[in-house]
Amino acid sequence: MSTATTIEWTEVTWNPSTGCDRISEGCDNCYALTLAKRLKAMGSAKYQNDGDPRTSGPGFGVAVHEDVIEEPLHWRRSRKVFVNSMSDVGHARVPAAFVAKVFAVMAVCPQHSFQVLTKRPGRLAAMLSRPDFHAGLVRAAVEDLLSRHRGLAGRLAALDRDPFVWPSPNVWLGTSIESDNYCRRADELRQAPAAIRFLSLEPLLGPLPSLDLTGIDWVIIGGESGPRHRPLDLDWVRDLRDRCADQQVALFFKQVGGRKPKDGGRLLDGRTWDEFPGDLLVAESE
C-alpha cells in the first residue's frame, strides 16, 4: 500500500526496494537509515535485512520487494508518488530487470506522476539509455502487466496513453546534490532519457557555483533537520533562486531546517516557493 507522507513536494511514497549505502556527506544524517533501524525493531518484514555497518545499518540492507511492485495499479486517484523514499533505484544491488519492472508499472499508470530520486544518476542513465533496456526488459514487463491485469489496456486507451512511449511522460527523474563537489550528478542526469529532470538540493550544505541548470525542469532546496543538522545559509538559497528565475526553472523551497523540520520555517525573503514543473509555462500563457 502507499504511505502518506509529510514531504511537502509529494503526496505518497512507494518503496518497491528498500535499503541503501551512504556515499557522500549528504548521507551523514540519513533519516531513512534511522527509520529502518526502528522498523526492524518493530518487526517490519521489509526491514529485516541488515546493511554493511560501515555504510548502512540494521534493517537497511538493499532488498527488492516483488510483493509491492504492482501497488500503483490499484490507486485510481491521481497522485504525486515519491519512488523509493527508503532506497535508491540506481543502487548497484538493485537488478536491472527489477528496475525495468518498476518503470513498466509507472508506464501503465499515467494517472500518477512518479518522482524518481537517485544519488547514482550515472548508473541509472547508463541503464535507461541502453536500447535493450526499453525495447527488451521494460517492454516485456509492460506486456506481462497487460496480459495479467484485465481492463488495464482499456483504461490506458481511455486515457489516450501508449505505455510503450519512451521515456514515460509521467516519470520525473532526479538526483540529489548537497555540495559543489557533486554537481557532476546533474551532468550525469542530463544523459538519462526523461520527460522531466529535477534536482534535490537537500540537505544543502554549501553554495553551488558549479551547478549547471541546463536541461533541468525543477529544483528542490532544503536545509537539514535533526539533532545533528548542519546550518543553512540563506544566501546560498538566494543565489539558486535567482539562477532558477533567470533560466525559467521551477523552484520549491522545502525548509530552512533545524532540530525539527519545521523549526526554521519555509519563508525566503518573506514568501514561500512552491513551484512545480510546468507552473512557469502556465503562468506565461495566462
Image: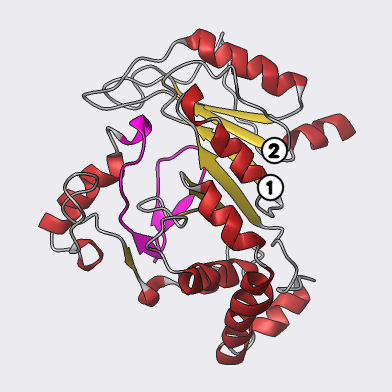
Magenta-drawn segment: 1-27
Q: Quadrant of residue 230?
A: top left
* Residue 174 vertical position relative to residue 201 in the rendered view, above or below: below
Residue depicted at 34% across the width and 30% down the height: 25
Q: Of the residues shown, which amino acid type is indicated by label 2?
A: Asp
- Rendering coords of residue 140 (x, y %): 61, 83
Residue depicted at 19% across the width and 55% down the height: 39
Mark 2, Cα crowd under 10 Å, few <14 / some 14-19 / many 20+, is many
Q: Is residue 31 left or right of residue 188?
A: left
Q: Are marks 1 and 2 in contact (CB under 8 Å)?
A: yes
Indicate which disc residue 196 carries. Answer: 1
Residue depicted at 46% across the width and 24% down the height: 179
Mark 1, Cα crowd under 10 Å, few <14 / some 14-19 / many 20+, is many
Queried whether the magenta region covers residue 23, the answer comes back as yes
- Rendering coords of residue 24 (x, y %): 36, 35
Q: Of the residues shown, which amino acid type is indicated by label 1?
A: Ile
Q: Is residue 90 left or right of residue 285?
A: left
Q: Secondary structure at mark 1?
A: strand
The quarter of the rendered structure image containing the N terminus is: bottom left
Q: Quadrant of residue 109?
A: bottom right
Q: Quadrant of residue 284?
A: top right
Q: Which of pointers 1 and 2 lies earlier in the amino acid sequence?
A: 1
Magenta part, dominant SS: loop
Q: Is residue 205 left or right of residue 42?
A: right
- Residue lying at the far right of the rendered structure: 285
Indicate which disc residue 217 carries. Answer: 2
